[in-house]
Image: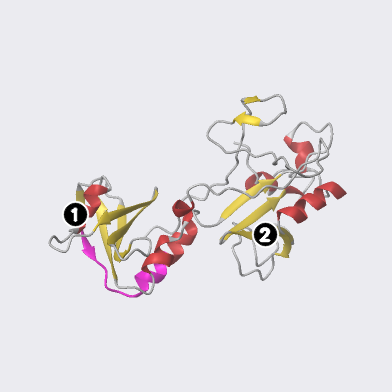
Amino acid sequence: MWTTFLHVYEILVLQLISSDADGAIQRAGRFRVENGSSVQNTDYTPGTWCRTDVHLENPEYHTRWYFKYFLGKVHQNYVGTDAEKNPFFLSVVLSDQNNQRVPQYRSVLWKKTGTQKICLPYSPTKTLSVKSILSAMSLDKFEKSPREILHPEIQKDLLVLEEQEGSVNFKFGVLYAKDGQLTDDEMFSNETGSESFQRFLSLMGDTITLKGWTGYRGGLDTKNDTTGICSVYTVYQGHEIMFHVSTMLPYSKENKQQVCNFHIDFS
């Protein structure tokens, strides 16, 4: 089994395409951008912002399928090798469709490139084969045909794999730039932020001590303080989020971007 899926930092660059007369963003590529909601039937002061609830698109895509639908239920896990000699795992469970007492198959295909999830209809007169499930996931050719894994430890390994995949927990870089700062070196050299920046961080989440932290760490060191003493953390709709804050990461004048640039990448 591979040790981990690709760990990538999620840097979201939003290009604002157009706006209406009030400055509300009409279109921003494939991202949803919300800049506050107008208040109706109340006293409203122009120029002020109102908080809006964050809209999580396609929440089922971010759901931990194995944890939610497979763990603790009778299911099968398979291992195989595709035509390119890449290993894969397949998990299959017979479950209820949206609590409507309609049985369906849920399947998760685990590959180095990520996971693929699919729901397939259940037929009491026709058994769904493993190869037909893989075919529905566009995997038809094998170097080694899939075989069932009966060892109970595989469940623990798949849970770890699901956590490492990144579809559940998220890490974001937060870079503080003072007025007039234009270069990376200038921004990364800020070891403290303004009072407004601190208020902003408090809105983003809670400041936690990294050493001994047992929650989602997002690649930060929780044993030896090599990536700073504190960070900002929150949980939103069951998803753990760790913010890599530039002013909280170690800074060295001799090697200005060694740690910061590793955890907050513009590329």
Q: CA distance from mark 2 to mark 1?
A: 42 Å
| Above or below for 145 versus 23 | below
Expressed as whole percent of the image width and height from the top left, the position of residue 46 reads 82, 35
Residue 94, image x, y percentages:
28, 65
Q: Is residue 50 above or below residue 124?
A: above
| Amino acid found under the numbered disc labelled 2 | Tyr
Residue at image position (87%, 49%) is: 195
Q: Note whether 214 is above or below 30 in the view shown.
A: below
Residue nearer the viewer, 74 or 96? 96
The location of residue 249, given as percent across then percent down, is 73, 53
Left or right: 128, with 17 as reference point: left
Q: Secondary structure at mark 1?
A: helix
Q: Quadrant of the C terminus?
A: top right
Q: Quarter of the image holding residue 158?
A: bottom left
Is 142 on the left or on the right of 91, as rendered?
Answer: left
Q: Nearer the viewer, residue 119 or 157?
A: 119
Residue in view at x 28 percent, y 48 percent:
137
* Residue 25 in view, yes or no: yes
The residue to which callout 1 is attached is: 131
Residue at 67% x, 59% y: name it.
Answer: 233
Going from N to C along the chain, the mark reached first, 2 or 1, is 1
From the image, tell me which residue sits under label 2.
233
Amino acid on which the number 1 mark rests in the picture: Lys
Q: Residue at x 58, y 48 (%)?
A: 55
Say whether residue 250 is visible.
no
Above or below for 196 versus 182: below
Rate crowding at label 1 as few (under 14), some (14 to 19) or many (20 or more) other CA atoms within 10 Å: some
Query: For the magenta stretch, what is the residue range?
Result: 145-158
Query: How many numbered callouts?
Result: 2
| 7 lies left or right of 203 | left
